[in-house]
């Protein structure tokens, strides 16, 4: 009896700890102090790892480890700084809570420095780093229905870390690529197979070792099977009992003649050919076959995943950011069954409907262009039946009717909210209305919009205002004229140095050192030009700057979404973006950086220089200097966006054939900033 009371208390604790008001849901953010994993410099982490290498190891082994630690530390920090990772959030806190339970019954884990963070990714996956950081994708947390399942995946990833599978795989691949030892006579195909098989062996080991950790816990061993089955359905966000229909979308069936929704059992789902020899993971059936004999206990009550609903709500807006509007509709409709009053879900569906309509308009507008491929029919066939069902519905509906229902749906939402002020949803309606005016007005299928203009005075006034302000037309990413700028944000400046004469060409440590100088140059140039600015960068972030960390994440998601969607689709987080511009007092965001390359002259250049200067003897030393002096080319780039109009206002990529020293970088940057300060007419 006490056990069940304890279980009930446990569940209530998590409901209180992680519960949200899902009717007024707000996407989760990082909070509290920024962890040291994010604030320590990559070079510091690298040196700590190198110091751990035993002096007794061979020179060859030391070199491989040093190279691995170099690439791994800087690579991990790229992930930590890109805004996709969450810390001190409900999901990450829950993961670390589960790890605490696993650690309690596995004393061997007590001395390990393991940290769990959540990654804003829809992909069903988790992955481990050499330094003890383990990332869980939201896509995985949205599919695993119990804490037991999460715990097994966690044990699997812990096994990778404990047995250093990352560095072992790296060392093995290096040996293969160098054509040495037993691999000396292997061709490229054999090497690919060898790498895949070695990786599969690690995955099999991680399953077995992880299960040995898992079986000491109180969790239900049988849930391991559920984990594997969840991985099998990676192409579906999560299970749902909701059937897609026009009624589920809450559309007015009197305005448009809708096509029939295709039955799920009539949809064929293609599967990718499973060449297991090339896969990094064994197939699911093989993994189940290996694990099942180890499951010795009977089924027992499982602990529900306390953050399942939160993860599933997060999936909705993550799909919008990726331009996966049909997936967003599926996820939101699935959740509406339990949360019918959620304004967040209603807005997700409206934004997705808007995205589908604008994408279809863009394809319609550019149908003569062969490079436009936003509706890849071949790829659609590999989607889950539930997703294909939604895609086929909108394909049958067509661009004109989709535009019509999107306009009607957005207008109904705006009217019910009781405001027609210039907010983000109004901006979306403007885009749809301009699409209607430009492409569909004369079509008989758009009769519902004509009726709306005729019968709804408020809509007619808004419609006329939109048409009158033609400057709002064609929200695109092409370069525009702009007024002079005296206040702007500068996002994540970068300085990257490459030596193409070497196999490992990217100079990690030098790039980090030069980046500090680059920040100083930005400060000096903006001061000279009297440009007020705020540099938003995670490269040298302090532990108290969590708000800046979240702002960087927001802007990065904006830029990622602009890249994923058609140019006529407004950012799904427009409301949050407008709030950010108000807080900083500017809507201008600049991206700035330097890429510097060093490379050798070719042989003909060297010989030519030596022969020519050898003829005129006094110039021979100059010829020798030129022949063996490396070549340099440096690229300076500056881009500036308006976060309000979502337009690219200024773009310049300037190459110069010299080393990227401070004087060169300063001069090039000053030129770009001068243009931005004056504006472009």
Image (cartoon, grey):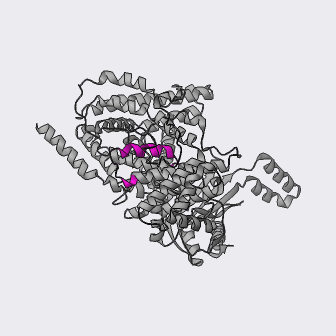
Decide if residue 143 is on the left or right side of residue 5.
Answer: right
As drawn, 124 above or below 480: above
**Residue 588 vs residue 167, the one in the foreground:** 588
Decide if residue 482 is on the left or right side of residue 292.
Answer: right
Decide if residue 630 is on the left or right side of residue 494.
Answer: right
Is residue 331 a member of the stretch shown in magenta? yes
- Residue 489: image location, x then y, percent: 52, 68
Is residue 581 a member of the stretch shown in magenta? no
Residue found at x 82% / y 53%: 609
**Residue 384 vs residue 599, the one in the foreground:** 384
- Main SS of residues in magenta: helix
Decide if residue 330 is on the left or right side of residue 510.
Answer: left
- Residue 679: image location, x then y, percent: 65, 73
As drawn, 628 above or below 202: below
Give the quadrant of the C terminus: bottom right
**Residue 116 vs residue 27, the one in the foreground:** 27
Residue found at x 23% / y 25%: 298
Judged from this view, the residue extending furthest toward the left is 1
Part of the protein shown in magenta: 321-344
- Residue 324: image location, x then y, percent: 51, 45
As drawn, 620 above or below 119: below
**Residue 400 vs residue 673, the one in the foreground:** 400
- Residue 173 appears in the picture as rendered: yes
Residue found at x 57% / y 30%: 192
- Residue 277: image location, x then y, percent: 53, 25
- Residue 76 appears in the picture as rendered: no
Give the quadrant of the N terminus: top left
Question: Where, by quadrant of the figure, is residue 210 drawn?
Answer: top left
């Amino acid at each position: 009896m006490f056990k069940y009371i304890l279980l009930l208390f446990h569940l209530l604790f998590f409901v209180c700890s992680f519960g949200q008001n899902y009717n007024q849901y707000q996407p989760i953010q990082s909070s509290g102090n920024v962890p040291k994993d994010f604030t320590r410099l990559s070079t510091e982490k690298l040196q700590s790892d190198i110091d751990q290498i035993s002096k007794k190891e061979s020179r060859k082994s030391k070199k491989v480890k040093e190279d691995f630690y170099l690439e791994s530390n800087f690579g991990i920090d790229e992930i930590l700084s890109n805004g996709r990772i969450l810390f001190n959030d409900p999901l990450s806190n829950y993961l670390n809570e589960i790890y605490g339970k696993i650690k309690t019954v596995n004393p061997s884990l007590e001395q390990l420095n393991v940290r769990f963070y959540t990654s804003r990714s829809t992909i069903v996956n988790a992955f481990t780093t050499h330094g003890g950081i383990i990332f869980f994708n939201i896509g995985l947390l949205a599919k695993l229905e119990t804490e037991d399942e999460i715990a097994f995946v966690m044990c699997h990833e812990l096994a990778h870390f404990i047995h250093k599978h990352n560095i072992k795989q790296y060392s093995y691949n290096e040996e293969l690529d160098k054509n040495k030892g037993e691999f000396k006579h292997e061709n490229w195909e054999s090497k690919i197979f060898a790498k895949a098989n070695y990786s599969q062996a690690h995955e099999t080991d991680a399953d077995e070792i992880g299960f040995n950790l898992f079986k000491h816990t109180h969790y239900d061993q049988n849930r391991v099977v559920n984990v594997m089955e969840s991985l099998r359905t990676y192409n579906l966000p999560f299970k749902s009992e909701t059937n897609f229909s026009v009624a589920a979308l809450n559309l007015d069936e009197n305005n448009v003649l809708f096509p029939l929704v295709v039955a799920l059992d009539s949809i064929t789902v293609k599967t990718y050919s499973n060449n297991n020899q090339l896969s990094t993971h064994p197939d699911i059936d093989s993994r189940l076959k290996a694990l099942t004999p180890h499951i010795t206990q009977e089924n027992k009550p499982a602990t529900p995943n306390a953050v399942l609903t939160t993860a599933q709500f997060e999936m909705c807006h993550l799909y919008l950011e990726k331009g996966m509007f049909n997936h967003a509709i599926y996820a939101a409709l699935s959740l509406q069954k339990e949360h019918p009053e959620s304004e967040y879900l209603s807005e997700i569906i409206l934004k997705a409907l808007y995205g589908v309509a604008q994408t279809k308009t863009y394809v319609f507008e550019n149908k003569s262009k062969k490079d436009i491929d936003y509706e890849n029919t071949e790829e659609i066939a590999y989607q889950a039946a539930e997703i294909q069902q939604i895609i086929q519905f909108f394909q049958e509906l067509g661009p004109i009717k989709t535009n019509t229902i999107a306009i009607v749906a957005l207008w109904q939402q705006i009217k019910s909210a009781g405001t027609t002020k210039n907010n983000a949803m109004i901006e979306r309606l403007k885009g749809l209305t301009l699409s209607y005016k430009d492409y569909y007005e004369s079509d008989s299928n758009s009769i519902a919009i004509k009726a709306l203009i005729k019968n709804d005075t408020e809509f007619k006034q808004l419609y006329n205002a939109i048409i009158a302000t033609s400057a709002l037309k064609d929200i695109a990413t092409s370069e525009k004229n702009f007024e002079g700028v005296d206040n702007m944000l500068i996002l994540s400046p970068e300085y990257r140095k490459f030596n193409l004469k070497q196999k490992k060409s990217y100079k990690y440590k030098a790039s980090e050192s030069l980046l500090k100088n680059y920040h100083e140059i930005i400060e000096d140039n903006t001061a000279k030009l009297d440009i007020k600015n705020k540099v938003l960068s995670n490269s040298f972030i302090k532990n108290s700057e969590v708000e800046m960390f979240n702002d960087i994440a927001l802007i990065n998601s904006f830029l990622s979404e602009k890249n994923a969607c058609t140019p006529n689709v407004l950012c799904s987080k427009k409301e949050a973006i407008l709030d950010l511009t108000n807080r900083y007092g500017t809507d201008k965001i600049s991206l700035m950086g330097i890429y510097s390359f060093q490379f050798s002259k070719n042989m003909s250049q060297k010989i030519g220089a030596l022969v020519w200067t050898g003829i005129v003897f006094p110039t021979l030393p100059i010829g020798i200097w030129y022949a063996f002096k490396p070549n340099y080319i440096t690229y300076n780039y500056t881009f500036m966006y308006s976060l309000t109009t979502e337009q690219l206002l200024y773009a310049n990529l300037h190459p110069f054939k010299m080393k990227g020293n401070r004087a060169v970088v300063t001069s090039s940057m000053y030129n770009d900033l001068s243009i931005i300060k004056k504006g472009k007419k």
